[in-house]
Image (tube, rainbow, N blue to C red):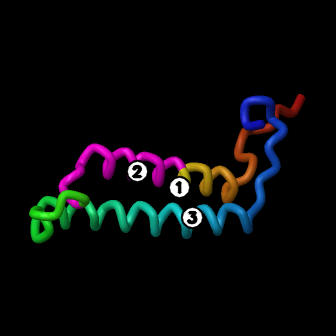
Amino acid sequence: RLAAGTHVPRRRTGLWLLVLGALYFGFMLFRLVAGLTFLADKPWFQARVPTVFHMVLAGFLLVLAMVHLRGDSRPTHQS
């Protein structure tokens, strides 16, 4: 829909995605820092690659939230 130009931005959806993405990213950041410091002895916290992958997914949610919150910011051509 974005490429075709038929995307309809929804502010409420954007807010939900922003909150969800921020919480997701924050938790994964905590997991990464904890795994590098005080929880280094726990296997779940030692897994760095899956943690970074989840941070990328959280980043996607944040970008999608911004798409919804900013709406259609493409310039219009007036003749």
Q: Quadrant of residue 45?
A: bottom left
- Residue highlighted by disc 3: 18
The C terminus - image quarter: top right
> Which amino acid lies under the numbered mark 2 shown in the image of this protein?
His
Q: Residue at x 52, y 47 (%)?
A: 60
- Circle nearer the viewer, 3 or 2: 2
Q: Residue at x 47, y 48 (%)?
A: 57
Image x and y of residue 25, in percent: 41, 61
The N terminus - image quarter: top right
Asked whether 8 or 54 is in front, the reply is 54
Mark 1 or mark 3, which is nearer the start of the sequence? 3
> Which amino acid lies under the numbered mark 3 shown in the image of this protein?
Leu
* Residue 30 lies in the magenta-colored region: no
Q: Quadrant of residue 65?
A: bottom right
User: Which residue is most to the front?
Assistant: 43
- Residue highlighted by disc 2: 54
User: Is residue 25 shown left or right of residue 4?
Assistant: left
